[in-house]
Amino acid sequence: MFVNKTSVANFNQPILIYTLPLYRKFKFLLVAVFLFLFQSGFSQTNKSYPPSNFPDRIIMGLKGDPAHSRAVNWRTDISVKKAVAEIHEADPSPDFEKNAKRVDANSQSLVLDKKEVQYHEVNFTALKPATQYMYRVGDGKRWSEWFHFTTASDQQAPLSFLYFGDAQSDVRSLWSRAIRGAYSAFPKVDFILHAGDLINNANEDYQWGEWFEAGGWLNGMIPSLSTPGNHEYFRGKDKKAQLSMHWRPQFVLPENGPEGLSETAYYIDYQGTRFITMDSEAAFSDSLVMQSQTAWFEKVAQNHGLRWTVVIHHHPIYSTNLGRDNQKWRKKMEPLYKKYKVDMVLQGHDHSYARGINMPIGEIRKKPDGPVYVVSVSGPKMYDIGLQSWMDRAASNTQLYQHINITDSLLAFKAYTVNGDLYDSFDLQKDVNGENTLIEYSNSLQVQERLELPERLQKRFNKKEMKEYNQRFLDYKARNNKHE
């Protein structure tokens, strides 16, 4: 059970309690003093990320057939008007440079944070399948280092990838350990999926700088496939939601989505699996976009002839936090996921972890009639967990990353804490008819479920809220005991 702590909720409350009479009399003075103290003594200075004439923020993506192409994006200052890249099949000898193929980049100038910068993009095409290459980018004089990558097979073959929920806050300080730890454990993955809210403020350049610094050089070696979250959108002058001005210039993503959602909704086929990324924030902001995106999804989800289908979007079909339910999205999408036999849905947004299927207790859960739903968080911003009935495994106040391996007949899912501990594990076994059997491993894991509320939330909860949480905890444990 959990300790009910009803003391002062946070640092600010005692100040307000003891200064309330003074505050009423000297409101403006006290506010000014408090803000000065906060800004001078407690705020963190952000690192700046000015561009130079050398390439930075180098990131690889997938725009076309992953067996025959790769795309790369990078940034410089405005002095670099003409950018190029060089590519060559990987060679252990350093004498390859004179034979490297040079490719011109497409460049664009943008004003971000009141500073003009240059973004450059190159698409390497006509590559050989399942072949290791190396490339560098620059202007012909000032170059990046050489990066290695391997193209996909043009046949159905095993693949693996990393999946991250929201990074969002303290990215340089604390999310860095998630992506670096994941890469250290699984350096041979084919690509990385980011399920939205990569940063906190859509157009803050230093936050994007932190995100690129956290991933560092591995962004240039492993393709990234990202979907925007609500924090990648901002309200323009017309009060309508607009995509971050950084998004399209700095990422290289497929442009095969519905009209108006280029590089935010798209699909990619990789060695026998179709990955479909949905822009849930755009759908929430405009009912017409939701309809057009739903129609597009039906076209790309049906009869594609591949063994597996994985869907990625930011807002969960089933929330992990009370009061954050997404009923309109669920009403639209869940019937389609079942109709087109989606195997797994990867999500973010709710800043806690849960995995499960939407099946009533008592039914044979080894034969799911829809996808496995996962909600995860990789950054340090945390919410209390709702412990709803759809969950089979959950975690509170825990940074995680996920590694997924797919073969012709098996999808193996594993979630790890940033310490490297295996926290959740299941398999989906697909038979010759395309039907899945769920094999559950979480009950045999050494790491117990992390469900206790962190101290800061215990302080924030009143007695009634704490009692309600404790009851949800008991109900959750009782339900899951019946699953075993």
Image (cartoon, grey):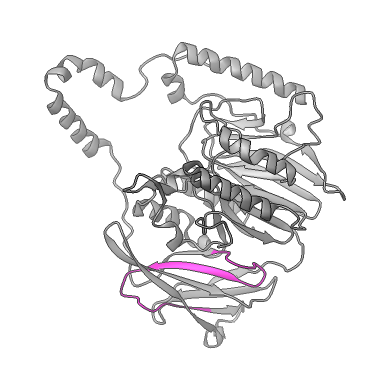
* Quadrant of res 183: bottom right
| 185 is within the stretch colored magenta | no
What is the count of numbered marks?
Answer: 0
Q: Over which residues does the magenta segment extend?
A: 61-86
Residue at (69, 56) in percent of width and height: 274
Decide if residue 359 is on the left or right side of residue 378: right
Across and down, in percent, residue 387 comes to 60, 25
| 64 is within the stretch colored magenta | yes
Which sits in the foreground, 336 or 5? 336
Instruction: Tell me, yes or no, if residue 391 can be seen here.
Output: yes
* Quadrant of res 9: top left
Q: Relative to 60, say whether 122 is above or below.
A: below
Residue at (51, 59) in percent of width and height: 262
Decide if residue 86 is on the left or right side of residue 359: left
Task: State the quadrant of the C terminus.
Answer: top right
Q: Residue furthest bottom?
A: 98
Across and down, in percent, residue 471 comes to 59, 14
Decide if residue 290 is on the left or right side of residue 373: left
Residue at (55, 27) in percent of width and height: 385
Across and down, in percent, residue 230 comes to 46, 43
Q: Relative to 68, say whether 419 is above or below.
A: above
Task: State the quadrant of the N terminus.
Answer: top right
Instruction: Tell me, yes or no, if residue 166 can be seen here.
Output: no
Q: Residue furthest right?
A: 432
Decide if residue 120 is on the left or right side of residue 433: left
